[in-house]
Image (cartoon, rainbow, N blue to C red):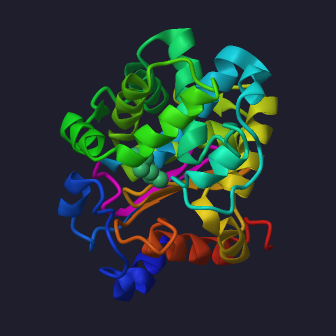
Amino acid sequence: MLQDIACEVRGHLGNGKVASYIPELKKVPKTKFGMAVHTADGVEVSVGDAAEPFSIQSISKLLTLILALCRGGDEVWERVGKEPSGTPFNFLAQLELEKGVPRNPFINAGALVVTDYLRQKVGAVAPVVRDYARVLTGSDGIDVNTQVAMAEFAHAHKNLAIAHLLRTYRTIHSDPSTLVREYCNQCALEVSCSQLARLFLPLAAGGFSRILGETVMTERIVRRVNALLMTSGVYDSVGSFAYRVGLPAKSGVGGGIVAIAPGKCSIAVWSPGLDRSGNSLVGTLALELFAQRTKLSVLG
Ligand code: GLU
């Protein structure tokens, strides 16, 4: 099935725009396409460039949220909401109107709050996120691309503005510049589709990691994270994404998307050309085809 999907999307490769606001990401060819599926009962399949590591960017927000919930329970919800934002991921005005409380943990403001929260618990966040990804995939090679992180930080004026606004409202405690540097590091983690599908398999398996042979997050966390992915995981196109794909998912401007079919499988796709909202154009199409064929989504 993955081979068929790869054939069907081929004609669309090259469409969309790469995230040029992070200069290093401009260099990645738009024709890349990879897809991997890991089932809850242990089958792993992949197609195309599924073994090639890419910049996970916003998908790292899913890792920091899971870590924050695992370490601190519901405490983090005192500082960030659970509603879709309906605005672009780095929109500033909504934050001011809503007195410094971000709508959800997947827009940049919310992710900065989660990273700030984690910094208080664990110190430097990026190495903890990297090690978590290494352990849950069983791949020691996963790392942060420091060039991508530095290139993003050099242009991070909007994220710095968001962090300063958060600091003004005391939603964060860290120095804004230190926090945004940390955030750029976590976003610059490079992971392949095969590794991503493996990494997030516990969200499709009631919290159980097949790699470790143990439960790594409670079912309560799994259910809640999947709900947030459904309502806020793909920027301001959650509605049209649900309409087409119908699965909880998190995307990143590196062109990756991770989707969860609860109880069944995790799916990762990568193709760098992005649509208007910042989601992988071909990746969304591939997930739409997958959901249609497997009937694993809420769309039936
Ligand atoms: N590091 C990116 C930013 O903050 C992540 C955005 C994304 O992938 O949505 O702009």
Residue extent of the magenta highlight: 36-53
Residue sitting at 29 percent across and 31 percent down? 143
The answer to whether residue 204 is seen in the rendering is yes
Q: Is residue 292 left or right of residue 52?
A: right
Residue sitting at 29 percent across and 48 percent down? 53
- Counting the numbered discs, the total is 0
Q: Is residue 159 left or right of residue 153?
A: right
Above or below 50: residue 215 = above
Q: Which quarter shows the C terminus? A: bottom right
Q: Is residue 23 left or right of residue 281?
A: left
Q: Residue 282, position in %: x, y? A: 44, 75
Determine which quarter of the picture holds residue 70. top right
The answer to whether residue 40 is seen in the rendering is no
Above or below 150: residue 214 = above
Front residue of 222 and 90: 90
Front residue of 258 and 168: 168
Q: Residue 273, position in %: x, y? A: 36, 71
204 in the magenta segment: no
Determine which quarter of the picture holds residue 102. top right
Q: Residue 52, position in %: x, y? A: 28, 52
